């Protein structure tokens, strides 16, 4: 697992590059700010985003085998730092990140009394960032693609599999990735990813759009504390934002 502290000493050029956009007001306890962007469409800003990265991020970027994946990683991390820097009134390269025991990043140099939480997801060229104030949040985007035969067995509980198998074949692909995004976002809100089994969060597959789990860890009472909001990142992409918090809404940012 990663346990990194990012460098907090940007150059004068990096400060100029990072502070050109206006500052942002952090989300309230009733909001989750969601940012979405096309990683490939941001290719013209690649050099700018690369200048925002820490030494460790540069090293990780260098480990990618394919240039397309390296460029998408650099663009995603640079944009993440750029946005967080606007909330914190810091240059992007000065945003200090550490990683939890399961790899979820968090910011360590926030103003006294602040607790900005965030989560980043990407699938192919689609990226999405969720930013919340005061509670953990998870986000996931999934390109809709052919379903491997073993995937429903790995993702669904037995009750979900019964619902899935009863669906018309024309609906199965969309419902599968809609549910996958809900589960992944919920697990990321816990900070565990798929350390916990996917069936830890069980959903009613007949529900579409905003919803809540039917069970969490087998308990309906725990499920009542959760809310999952649907995203529409693109015509061939499913997405969801999740938090163990009620009464919040998604605010789409740009």
Image: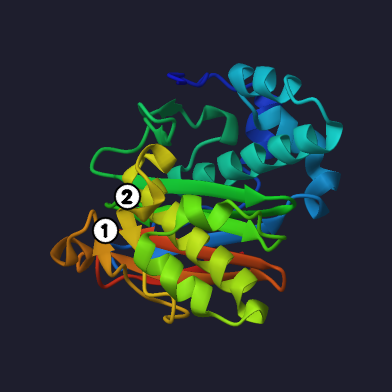
- From the viewer's perspective, is 78 left or right of 2? right
Query: Residue 199 appears in which quarter of the rendering?
Result: bottom left
- Do the numbered discs 1 and 2 sit on residues whose CB atoms are within 8 Å? yes
How many residues crowd mark 1 within 10 Å: few (<14), some (14–19), many (20+)? some
What is the residue that sits farthest to the left in this orientation? 221
The foreground one among 6 and 228 is: 228
Q: Residue 156: where, in percent of width, then height?
A: 43, 59
**Which quadrant of the figure contains the C terminus?**
bottom right
Which residue does the numbered mark 2 point to in the structure image?
136
Query: Residue 185 appears in which quarter of the rendering?
Result: bottom left
How many residues crowd mark 2 within 10 Å: few (<14), some (14–19), many (20+)? many
Q: Residue 127: where, in percent of width, then height?
A: 64, 53
The foreground one among 253 and 124 is: 124
Q: Secondary structure at mark 1?
A: loop
Q: What residue sits 55% from the left and 72% below the top?
A: 175
Q: Residue 35: where, in percent of width, then height?
A: 57, 59
- From the viewer's perspective, is 81 left or right of 229? right
Q: What residue sits 38% from the left and 60% below the top?
A: 242
Q: Secondary structure at mark 2?
A: loop
Which residue does the numbered mark 1 point to in the structure image?
244
């Amino acid at each position: 697992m990663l346990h990194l502290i990012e460098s907090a000493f940007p150059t004068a050029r990096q400060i100029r590059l990072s502070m050109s956009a206006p500052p942002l007001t952090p989300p309230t306890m009733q909001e989750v700010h969601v940012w979405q962007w096309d990683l490939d469409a941001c290719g013209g800003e690649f050099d700018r985003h690369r200048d925002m990265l820490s030494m460790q991020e540069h090293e990780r970027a260098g480990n990618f085998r394919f240039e397309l994946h390296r460029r998408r990683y650099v663009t995603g991390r640079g944009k993440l730092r750029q946005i967080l820097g606007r909330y914190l009134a810091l240059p992007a390269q000065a945003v200090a990140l550490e990683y939890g025991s399961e790899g979820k990043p968090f910011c360590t140099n926030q103003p006294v009394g602040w607790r900005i939480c965030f989560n980043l997801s990407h699938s192919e060229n689609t990226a999405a960032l969720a930013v919340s104030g005061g509670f953990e949040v998870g986000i996931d985007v999934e390109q809709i693609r052919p379903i491997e035969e073993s995937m429903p067995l790995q993702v669904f509980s037995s009750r979900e599999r019964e619902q899935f198998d009863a669906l018309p074949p024309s609906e199965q692909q969309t419902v599968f990735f809609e549910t996958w995004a809900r589960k992944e976002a919920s697990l990321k809100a816990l900070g565990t990813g798929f350390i916990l089994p996917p069936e830890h969060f069980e959903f009613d597959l007949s529900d579409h759009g905003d919803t809540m789990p039917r069970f969490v860890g087998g308990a309906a009472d725990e499920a009542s504390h959760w809310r999952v909001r649907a995203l529409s990142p693109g015509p061939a992409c499913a997405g969801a934002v999740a938090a163990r918090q009620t009464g919040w809404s998604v605010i789409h940012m740009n």
